[in-house]
Image (cartoon, helix red, strand yellow):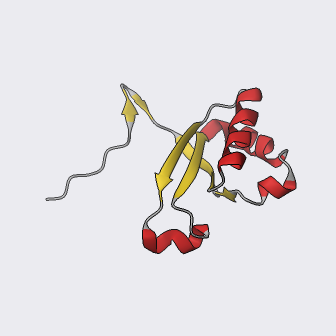
Amino acid sequence: MAAKKKPKTLGKHISRDVELCRTTNHVVSSQLIKMLIEYEVPFTQNWKRVPFFKRMAYKGAREVCVVSTHCTQYSRARKVVDQMDHSRKKQIIFHAV
């Protein structure tokens, strides 16, 4: 019998984080994080290894930065990202909520 996957919790609180975007560029991720901190938007940043056979989707990158935020802060975080320089913003893969 397969066990049901429980939601991540912090005590009594259920994690309500949603993925905001992904990028493989370290400079872009640093700029994005600085802007989110400047505008006081809560977020988490995780670098994940990209499996070998999925690297074509990320133009050969070995790791990808996944930036998440609380579900109630998604639109605010998206407005911050939209203020980024166009050349850097096109290196970001947005996640649709």
Residue shown at the point (56%, 49%) measured from the top left: 66
Q: From this viewpoint, is residue 39 visible?
A: no
Q: From this viewpoint, is residue 27 visible?
A: yes
- Image quarter of the N terminus: bottom left
Going by the picture, which residue comes out furthest to the left?
Answer: 1
Q: Position of residue 85 (x, y in %)?
A: 86, 50
Residue shown at the point (80%, 43%) measured from the top left: 79
50 sits to left or right of 42: left
Circle count: 0
Picture quadrant where residue 87 is located: bottom right
From the viewer's perspective, is residue 88 above or below residue 78? below
16 sits to left or right of 97: left
Residue shown at the point (55%, 55%) measured from the top left: 64
From the viewer's perspective, is residue 10 above or below residue 97? above
Residue shown at the point (73%, 59%) measured from the top left: 91
Q: Position of residue 80 (x, y in %)?
A: 78, 40
- Image quarter of the C terminus: bottom right
Q: Position of residue 49 (x, y in %)?
A: 46, 56
From the viewer's perspective, is residue 14 above or below residue 83? above
Q: Nearer the viewer, residue 14 or 94?
A: 94
Picture quadrant where residue 86 is located: bottom right
From the viewer's perspective, is residue 59 above or below residue 42? below
Q: Nearer the viewer, residue 83 or 14?
A: 83
